[in-house]
């Protein structure tokens, strides 16, 4: 190769082009997935039995009144027309009007997201701290008492259902010790950030137990696998301590499978808070979906499910981008 071709500027240009192509392909996949998800969500809710207008008016309502309400809600229009009307509203931020609450769906969703998103983020922070600490410690103590103890605790954590552990936390920290509230959410404005986080601590901990147990095992396996690589043995042969090799060489290379699981777990936390929100009586998105299903408020259910699905897809997109940042070989092999 010529000196120009092997210059640092030329190499950086190639890397930028590869990264741009990688991001473009991922964005195309992201959009296609969202379109397919919207079609599936709409069709699944369309085939559900029952009539929203009939449920809202009651079983004894005259057919003429039910028909008039159905026309007002737009339920008498063809499905394809209602689908494109819904998608057009999503693109401009108009999620429609709730059948049951007579309130814009966007306002309902935003109000509930102020609970669900901080709850998922707090649970993810607890999961990451507990899992990385336990997984790295277990790998450093491989086949020793500490490793066996950590793996035993993680096996127990995987076996514990979230809702059952949530009840145990309420009994211990709320009923007996009185350190935390047994349920409800005071609001960010009334109690401030610390008060809100205090109210979410037990729900977040109940969500984090299972997730941290899974992530700790993944972290331990990834670290042990990298520890066996040749470059780690070379570093040790050059006089690098085991601790130095672990923190300086192993962790970065072990992060890809860990970040994969973390992305999936965060998406699961966003979409799976309904049970814990019900146990702690939190006004989050999960409870809104549950109440809307009971009320046959399909426009709220449709938008909430689509929002959660979009969050899952976007989180996976971010994980893919992080792959390329951590290991450039990922984007090179994907193009």
Image: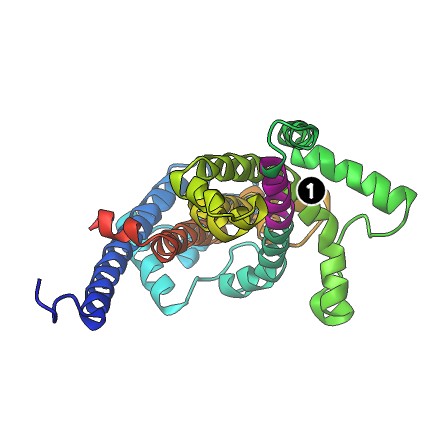
Q: Residue 121 appears in which quarter of the rendering?
A: bottom right
| Residue 257 shows up from this direction | no
- Pick whichever, 143 or 105, lies toward us: 143
In the shown orientation, is residue 282 left or right of residue 327? right
In the shown orientation, is residue 316 left or right of residue 60? left
Q: Magenta stretch: residue 50 in it?
A: no
Image x and y of residue 1, in percent: 8, 62
For image coordinates 72% across by 64% down, the residue present is 187
Model colouring: rainbow
In the shown orientation, is residue 286 left or right of residue 335? right
- Pick whichever, 309 or 298, lies toward us: 309
- Pick whichever, 247 or 315, lies toward us: 247
Q: Is residue 197 above or below residue 64?
A: below
| Residue 272 shows up from this direction | yes
- Pick whichever, 264 or 14, lies toward us: 14
For image coordinates 91% across by 46% down, the residue present is 177
Secondary structure found at label 1: helix
Image x and y of residue 291, in percent: 60, 46
* The residue positioned farthest toward the left in the image shown: 2
Q: Is residue 26 above or below residue 44?
A: below
Crowd rating for badge 1 (residues with CA inside 10 Å; few <14, some 14–19, many 20+): many
For image coordinates 70% across by 28% down, the residue present is 145
Q: Magenta stretch: residue 132 in it?
A: yes
Q: Residue 96 appears in which quarter of the rendering?
A: bottom left
For the magenta stretch, what is the residue range? 127-139
Please give the residue where the numbered disc 1 appears in the rendered image.
206
Image x and y of residue 287, in percent: 62, 48
């Amino acid at each position: 190769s010529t000196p120009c071709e092997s210059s640092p500027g030329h190499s950086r240009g190639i890397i930028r082009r590869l990264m741009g192509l990688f991001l473009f392909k991922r964005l195309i996949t992201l959009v296609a997935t969202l379109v397919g998800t919207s079609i599936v969500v709409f069709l699944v809710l369309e085939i559900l039995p029952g009539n929203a207008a009939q449920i809202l008016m009651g079983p004894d309502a005259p057919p003429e009144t039910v028909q008039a309400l159905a026309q007002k809600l737009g339920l008498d229009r063809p499905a394809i027309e209602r689908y494109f009307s819904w998608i057009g509203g999503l693109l401009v931020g108009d999620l429609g009007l709730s059948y049951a609450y007579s309130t814009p769906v966007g306002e309902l969703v935003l109000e509930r997201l102020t609970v669900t998103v901080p709850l998922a983020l707090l649970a993810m922070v607890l999961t990451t701290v507990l899992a990385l600490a336990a997984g790295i410690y277990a790998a450093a103590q491989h086949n020793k008492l500490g490793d066996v103890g950590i793996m035993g605790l993680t096996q127990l954590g995987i076996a514990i259902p979230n809702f059952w552990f949530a009840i145990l936390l309420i009994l211990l920290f709320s009923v007996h010790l009185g350190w935390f509230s047994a349920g409800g959410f005071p609001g960010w404005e009334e109690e401030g950030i610390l008060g809100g986080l205090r109210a979410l601590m037990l729900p977040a901990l109940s969500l984090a137990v299972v997730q941290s147990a899974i992530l700790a095992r993944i972290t331990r396996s990834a670290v042990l696998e990298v520890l066996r690589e040749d470059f780690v043995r070379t570093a040790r042969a050059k006089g690098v301590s085991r601790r130095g090799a672990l923190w300086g060489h192993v962790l970065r290379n072990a992060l890809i499978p860990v970040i994969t699981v973390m992305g999936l777990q965060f998406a699961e936390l966003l979409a799976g808070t309904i049970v814990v929100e019900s146990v702690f009586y939190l006004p989050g998105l999960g409870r809104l979906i549950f109440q809307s299903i009971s009320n046959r408020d399909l426009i709220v259910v449709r938008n909430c499910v689509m929002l959660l699905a979009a969050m899952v897809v976007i989180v996976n997109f971010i994980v893919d981008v992080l792959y390329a940042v951590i290991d450039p070989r990922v984007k090179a092999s994907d193009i």
